[in-house]
């Protein structure tokens, strides 16, 4: 059977399944080189947009991150492991009721000659800047509404292929949502310390083996800070792989992020948190479907802002995603106690999180296990622990056939509603 060496302090990745999931999540992160460039690039974009002669000269109030970038949940994009989608809000000094088409055209005019090899493109709600290394910035124009808190604003919807009658203003509060999410997902010191140590190791960055969390040098920034955010990244990746061949819209990241915020809190392993989030989303999708309605998930910082205004398009889409999430949660719960070989687990992971990411994560796992066996001691820090295998089984404490599938979680009642 497997042997676990426990030392003072709890390693959040002591369980092999949690260790492997953490390695998969690390493979999805923005690489250190690109991570360091994010701030530089969006500052360069801002300077270009307000340069002398720009139509936005003197009209830019601030640039700030939104979405995954604002909550440290960015992962590689749908369909590839080498592209990263980063979202920026450009707060402009304009009339909040300005014509949506004119506002988007104005931003495009200010950015269309920005020097990137892959070009600049106007979208329905943003302007996209594409870099040769796979990163692209989506810059969304916004105008803050008067007498509101937390940067409540209008963004602008104007599909250039649609008539003006189908253009409209969208009330939103991305800043308020990010503040809400961060308040619900505070720093988990031990989790962050161990996860970021693994991240540094995966990219060959050197940090003293016995360094405390707050002693990590500034040049090796924190990648993530809590279990809920890593679980969210894994759930987003699962969605990306599950819908890799989809041609229409897929379940929105902001909806999953909102559920992750609600699911956060309390001691939890990484696998437990992925299961919790998957069941929570599935439960709400099924609840809406049972009532014959599409799910309506709203911004906790602005209840009139609907995160699901463009997905799902019909009941079949939300039932399909609910079924996928339920299956994922059931299988993860089974894997927590099932005996399974490393090869079998790798095959399961690849089907759900992508071949390249899993190959990288399994390589990291094998390197750590090899060091642990050679050293016959702890792998990381005197405050943690290490998993040492004595047989070619990777996960489990009992026979797979003896594991019962868990029941669905009880329905939740915290979600708001928005008009369709």
Image (tube, rainbow, N blue to C red):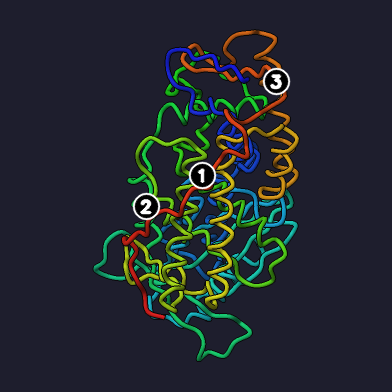
Quadrant where the N terminus lies? top right
Q: How far apart are marks 2 and 1 (CA)?
A: 13 Å
Residue furthest to the front in view is 402
Place of residue 341 in the rendered image (x, y in percent of width and height, measured from the top left): 71, 32
Residue density around tag 3, few if under 14, some if 14–19, many if 20 or more, within 10 Å: few
Residue 317 appears left or right of 178: right
Q: Name the residue under label 2.
A: 262
| Observer able to see residue 219 | no
Place of residue 99 in the rendered image (x, y in percent of width and height, measured from the top left): 46, 83
> Considering the numbered disc 3 on the image, is that residue within a helix, a strand or a loop?
loop
Viewer-side residue, 60 vs 381: 381
Res. 79 mark: none
The structure residue drawn at horizontal position 70% and vertical position 20%, both measured from the top left corner, is 391
Residue 343 appears left or right of 397: right
- Quadrant of the rendered image containing residue 335: top right
Classify 116 as above or below 285.
above
Q: Name the residue under label 1.
A: 231
| Observer able to see residue 47 | yes
Residue density around tag 1, few if under 14, some if 14–19, many if 20 or more, within 10 Å: many
Place of residue 364 in the rendered image (x, y in percent of width and height, measured from the top left): 69, 28
Q: Distance between the residues labelled 3 and 2?
A: 39 Å
> Considering the numbered disc 1 on the image, is that residue within a helix, a strand or a loop?
helix
> Considering the numbered disc 2 on the image, is that residue within a helix, a strand or a loop?
helix
Mark 3 vs mark 1: in front: 3
The structure residue drawn at horizontal position 51% and vertical position 61%, both measured from the top left corner, is 50
Place of residue 60 in the rendered image (x, y in percent of width and height, measured from the top left): 44, 62
- Sequence order check, earlier mark of 3 and 1: 1
Viewer-side residue, 111 vs 292: 292
Q: Mark 3 points at which residue?
A: 391
Q: How far apart are marks 3 and 1 (CA)?
A: 29 Å
Classify 352 as above or below 9.
below
Asked if the residue at tag 1 contacts the one at tag 2, i.e. Cβ–Cβ closer than 8 Å, the answer is no
């Amino acid at each position: 059977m497997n042997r676990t060496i426990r030392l003072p302090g709890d390693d959040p990745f002591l369980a092999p399944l949690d260790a492997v999931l953490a390695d998969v999540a690390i493979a999805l992160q923005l690489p250190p080189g690109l991570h360091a460039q994010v701030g530089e690039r969006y500052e360069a974009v801002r300077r270009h947009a307000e340069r002398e002669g720009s139509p936005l000269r003197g009209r830019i109030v601030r640039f700030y991150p939104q979405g995954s970038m604002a909550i440290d949940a960015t992962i590689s994009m749908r369909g590839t492991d080498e592209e990263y989608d980063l979202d920026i809000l450009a707060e402009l000094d304009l009339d909040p009721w300005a014509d949506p088409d004119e506002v988007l055209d104005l931003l495009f005019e200010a950015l269309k000659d920005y020097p990137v090899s892959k070009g600049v493109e106007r979208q329905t709600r943003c302007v996209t800047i594409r870099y040769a290394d796979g990163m692209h910035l989506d810059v969304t124009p916004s105008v803050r509404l008067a007498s509101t808190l937390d940067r409540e604003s209008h963004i602008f919807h104007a599909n250039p292929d649609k008539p003006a009658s189908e253009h409209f203003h969208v009330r939103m509060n991305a800043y308020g949502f990010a503040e809400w999410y961060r308040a619900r997902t505070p720093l988990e010191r031990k989790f962050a310390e161990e996860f970021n140590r693994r991240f540094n190791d995966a990219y060959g960055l050197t940090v003293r083996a016995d360094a405390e969390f707050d002693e990590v040098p500034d040049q090796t920034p924190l990648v993530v800070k809590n279990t809920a955010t890593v679980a969210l990244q894994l759930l987003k990746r699962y969605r990306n792989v599950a819908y890799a061949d989809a041609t229409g819209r897929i379940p929105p990241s902001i909806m999953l992020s909102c559920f992750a915020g609600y699911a956060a809190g309390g001691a939890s392993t990484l696998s437990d948190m992925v299961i919790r989030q998957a069941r929570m989303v599935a439960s709400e999708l099924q609840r809406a479907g049972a009532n014959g309605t599409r799910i309506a998930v709203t911004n906790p910082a602005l209840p009139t802002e609907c995160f699901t205004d463009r997905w799902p398009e019909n009941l079949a889409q939300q039932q399909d995603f609910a079924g996928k999430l339920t299956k994922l949660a059931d299988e993860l719960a089974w894997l927590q106690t099932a005996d399974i070989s490393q090869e079998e687990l790798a095959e399961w992971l690849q089907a759900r999180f992508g071949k390249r990411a899993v190959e990288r994560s399994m390589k990291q796992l094998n390197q750590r296990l090899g060091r642990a066996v050679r050293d016959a001691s702890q792998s990381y820090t005197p405050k943690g622990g290490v998993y040492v295998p004595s047989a070619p089984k990777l996960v489990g404490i009992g026979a797979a056939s003896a594991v019962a599938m868990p029941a669905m979680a009880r329905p939740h009642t915290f979600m708001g509603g928005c008009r369709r």
